[in-house]
Image (cartoon, helix red, strand yellow):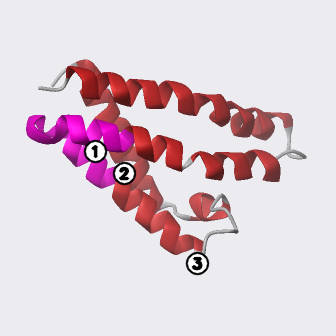
Amino acid sequence: MNKDAAGLTALLATAGVLHFATPGPFDAIVPRSLPGRPRTWTYLSGAAELAVAAAIAHPRTRRAGALAAAALFAGVFPANVKMAVDWRNASPARRAIAYGRLPLQVPLVLWARRVARVAP
């Protein structure tokens, strides 16, 4: 596995585990417009991250997994927007974190697409 694929796998696996180990911060950024309980969405997105990480880790499913990762990164963008709105009056450090997450989605999507392009 190349370094890009390994790094993306590690990032997604870590994020997926964190959704289950410490779900509270993820619950807080689930958009209110989604039906059901925030914890359900936290667990679903964590499971999706773990599944995508597993797909990227295996050469046969790497391309599909990386494309799914790109879609996942785009799909969670509304949660990042909610976090930025909710933290607009927070400390400067928290605002920097929340606002910094917004443009970070672009390189994450591009990273996933690059992994898909070079997949076997």
Classify residue 20 by image quadrant: bottom left
Residue type beneath disc 2: Glu
User: Residue at 80% of width from left, 53% of height from top?
Assistant: 86
Q: Which mark is residue 49?
A: 2
Mark 3 crowd level (few <14, some 14–19, many ≥20, 10 Å Cα): few
In the image, what residue type sits under mark 1? Ala
Secondary structure beneath dot 1 equals: helix
Image coords of residue 32 (percent x, y): 70, 68
94 left or right of 116 in image: right
Query: Disc 1 and disc 3: Cα gap in Å?
Result: 25 Å
Q: Which disc is residue 53 wearing? A: 1
Prevailing SS of the magenta stretch? helix
In magenta segment, residue 105: no
The C terminus appears in which quarter of the rendering?
A: top left
Image-based side of 54 in relation to 46, left or right: left
Q: Is residue 57 above or below residue 76?
A: above
Separation of residues labelled 2 and 3 (CA atoms): 19 Å
- Name the quadrant containing residue 95: top right
The x, y position of residue 112, in whole percent, is: 36, 30
Q: Quadrant of the N terminus?
A: top left
Which of the two discs, 2 and 3, labels the residue nearer the N terminus? 3
Q: Residue at x 44, y 67 (%)?
A: 43
* Label 1: how many Cα within 10 Å (few below 14, some 14–19, many 20+): many
> Residue under circle 3?
37
Q: Sequence order check: which comes first, mark 1 or mark 3?
A: 3
Q: Secondary structure at mark 3?
A: loop
Verify CB contact (< 8 Å) between mark 2 and mark 1: yes
Q: Is residue 84 left or right of residue 41?
A: right
Residue 71, percent across and down? 42, 43
Displayed quadrant of residue 38: bottom right
User: Count of labels shown?
Assistant: 3
Q: Which residues are magenta?
A: 49-69
